[in-house]
Image (cartoon, grey):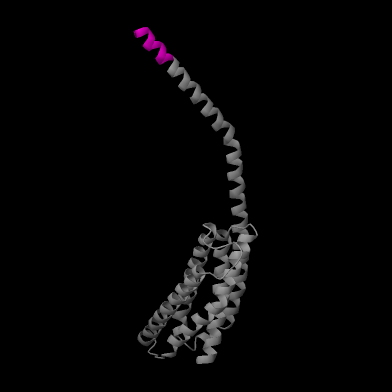
Amino acid sequence: YYAITAKSLKSCCAFNFNRFKKFIRKKEEMKLPILGATKRIIDKDVKEIAAAEFISVTIALFAGIFLVKLINKFYLIPALIILIPGFLAMHGSIFGSFAARLTVDLYTKKIKKKFQFSNIIFQNILATIFLLFVISIFLGVISYTATSIFFEVTSIKIILISLISAMLAAIIELPLIIVGIFWAFNKGFDPDDIMGPYVTVLGDIIGVLSLIFVIFLVA
C-alpha cells in the first residue's frame, strides 16, 4: 500500500514539476516580445505627448504675448483681472473632460470611428454647455462681488461678459474638439495623448479672443 502510494505521489510530483518547467519556459519565451511591445507603446506615447506639448506651449506663448499687448485695456475693467484666470481654467477643465469622455466612448465602441452625430455626442454637448452656463455665471458673480469690495467698482456687465464669452467660445471650440478627436483616432494616434494640450491651446486662444470681442460688444 505504502509502495503504491509513494509511487503515485512521485509520478504526480514529476508530472506537476514538468508542467511547471514548461510554464516557465513559455513565460521566458514570451517575455522579450511583451517587453518589446511595451517599449514600442511607451515610445509612441512619449513622442505623441512631447510633440503635442511642444506645439501647445509654443502657441500658448504667442497667445500670452497677444494678451500682454491688450493688458492696458483690461485695467480699465478691474473685474477682468479676477475673471480671466478662472475663465481660462474653466475652459481647460470642462472641454478637457468632454474630450476625455468622447475618447472613452470611441475606445469602448459606443461611438463609431466614422463620425456620425449620435445621441451620446449630443448628450455630452448638452452637459458641457450646461456646465459652461452655470460656472460662467458663478465666475461673473464672484468677479462682480470682489471688484465691489476691493475696488469699490460695480458693473453688472461683467456677468454678461463672462456668460456671453463662454457661450461664444463653446460654439467655436466644440466642433474643433470633436473634429480633433476623430482625426487623431482615425490616424492611429491616441487622443488621450494629444487632446489635453490641444484643448488647452484652443481654450487659451479662443477664450481670450471671445472675451475681447464681448468686452468691446458689451462694455
Q: Which of 3 and 17 is in front in this view?
A: 3
Report the magenta residues as a range.
1-10
Q: Which residue is drawn at 54% across and 90% down?
A: 216
Q: Which residue lies furthest to the right in this view?
A: 187
Q: Which residue is drawn at 60% across and 60% down?
A: 185
Q: Residue at x 55, y 69 (%)?
A: 199
Horizontal and vertical percent for residue 72?
54, 85
Q: Residue at x 34, y 8 (%)?
A: 2
**Quadrant of the drawing holding the N terminus:** top left
Could you tell me what secondary structure mostly forms the magenta stretch? helix
The answer to which image quadrant residue 155 occupies is: bottom left
Horizontal and vertical percent for residue 37?
60, 44
Left or right: 86 in relation to 103: left
Q: Which of 168 and 78 is in front in this view?
A: 168
The verdict on residue 6 being magenta is: yes
The answer to which image quadrant residue 144 occupies is: bottom left
The verdict on residue 215 being magenta is: no
Is 25 placed above or below 111 here? above
Is 79 placed above or below 49 here? below
Question: How many numbered marks does the figure carry?
Answer: 0
Is 35 placed above or below 13 here? below
Horizontal and vertical percent for residue 35?
58, 40
